[in-house]
Amino acid sequence: QKLTFSLKIAISSSLSKIHLNVSHGRLCASSTSFSQRNNSSSANLKVDHDQTTGVAVMHMQSPPVNSLSLDFLTEICITLEKLEMDKGCRGLIITSSQPKVFSAGLDILEMYGKSPERCGEFWKAVQEMWLKLYGSNMVTIAAINGSSPAGGCLMSITCDYRIMADNPRYSIGLNETMLGIVAPFWFKETMVNTVGHRNTEISLELGLLYKPAEALNIGLVDQLVPEDQVLSAATQTMTKWLAIPEHARQITKSMMRKSTIEKLRSNREADIQNFVNFITKESIQKSLRMYMEMLKQKKA
Ligand SMILES: CC/C=C\C/C=C\C/C=C\CCC/C=C/C(=O)SCCNC(=O)CCNC(=O)[C@H](O)C(C)(C)COP(=O)(O)OP(=O)(O)OC[C@H]1O[C@@H](n2cnc3c(N)ncnc32)[C@H](O)[C@@H]1OP(=O)(O)O
């Protein structure tokens, strides 16, 4: 049965004991237990939930590069909602199972050659993921074990803390302008809230991707560790954060992020319309096509 994205999200709250599998815009449910086991997986996500520590690790495993398609975003949103509602889950670590890449950002193919309706549905899912992560009551840590451009960087900076693999082959940043597109205001504000106004201005105008040491230098990531220690460092940091009185931490987080969240929440439809009008322009479609060709050439 085909379900719209918003309906999927609306019903997800009542699916806490249902195994979810989202494929090509379809939500399939089978009655295996989610909450009784420590581990769960859907098509492109594996969640290890340690009930004793209250920490879940969400492994993104959407080949080849964890690009955020509508289906993948929907899976992420449903998982986030389930974890958020689970009182036994107080902390979330997000990491990648794909080699060399945390996430390649939004799936460019979702923005190229698609109908305005489909683009709108896609953008609503991007908004939903950001709202869920940026507004989460859980402690959220990005364990960045590979490159993390654009939407991958956005995902990282919505978390409370970022630990990146100290590997100069990896990079992170909001490089949208390099694709001929523009980071919307809530991407920009999340970045300002992380690295300040001046760093954001330079970073966004030039579409910069930072090597780990540079990212640490401007505060885009909080810690660098050897590649094989990213997850263990995230787990150690999580222990420290979870020792803080929870209510006080949550209220403080909400106070810091509220105005940015409210700005999007109260303007969602206009923001979707803005995206659709922008992305479907012929000139923007041409830029995306050229960027995709450049990616292919780089490979050849
Ligand atoms: C007035 C206007 C005001 C406001 C604006 C209004 C609205 C806003 C409008 C738009 C906002 C849009 C915001 C967009 C955000 C984004 O996230 S866009 C995506 C940006 N991502 C990138 O630039 C990353 C591109 N990818 C890479 O750099 C590399 O792939 C990698 C470093 C991630 C990994 O490198 P490798 O390991 O070497 O892998 P390959 O490059 O060989 O890639 C493998 C395979 O995957 C395909 N691919 C890579 N990235 C993407 C992607 N993001 N989407 C879809 N597909 C991707 C790549 O082409 C390869 O495909 P094949 O060749 O194997 O078919």
Image (cartoon, rainbow, N blue to C red):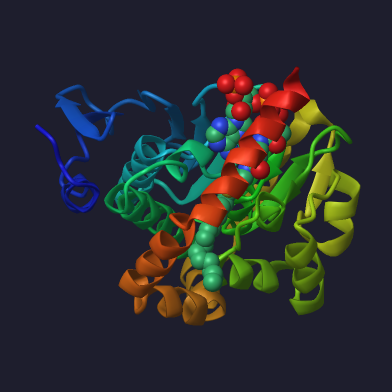
44 or 86, which is in the foreground? 44
296 or 52, which is in the foreground? 296
Q: Position of residue 210 (x, y in %)?
A: 83, 50
Q: Residue furthest front?
A: 282
**Residue 283 higher or lower than 25, as above or below:** below
Q: Residue furthest left?
A: 1
In-image side of 113 versus 160 (left or right) = left
Number of marks in the image? 0
Q: Quadrant of residue 148?
A: top right
Q: Quadrant of ligand 1?
A: top right
In-image side of 252 versus 90 (left or right) = right
111 or 225, which is in the foreground? 111
Residue at screen point 32% across, 53% down:
116
Residue at screen point 18% across, 40% down:
15
Q: Position of residue 267 (x, y in %)?
A: 36, 77
Q: Position of residue 131 (x, y in %)?
A: 42, 62
Residue 269, visible in the rendered structure: yes
Q: Quadrant of residue 102?
A: top right
In the picture, the quarter occupied by the N terminus is top left
**Residue 292 higher or lower than 277, as above or below:** above
In the picture, the quarter occupied by the C terminus is top right
In-image side of 123 versus 101 (left or right) = left
Residue 97, visible in the rendered structure: no
Residue at screen point 73% across, 46% down:
163
Residue at screen point 56% across, 42% down:
93
Q: Quadrant of residue 211?
A: top right
Q: Position of residue 3 (x, y in %)?
A: 15, 41
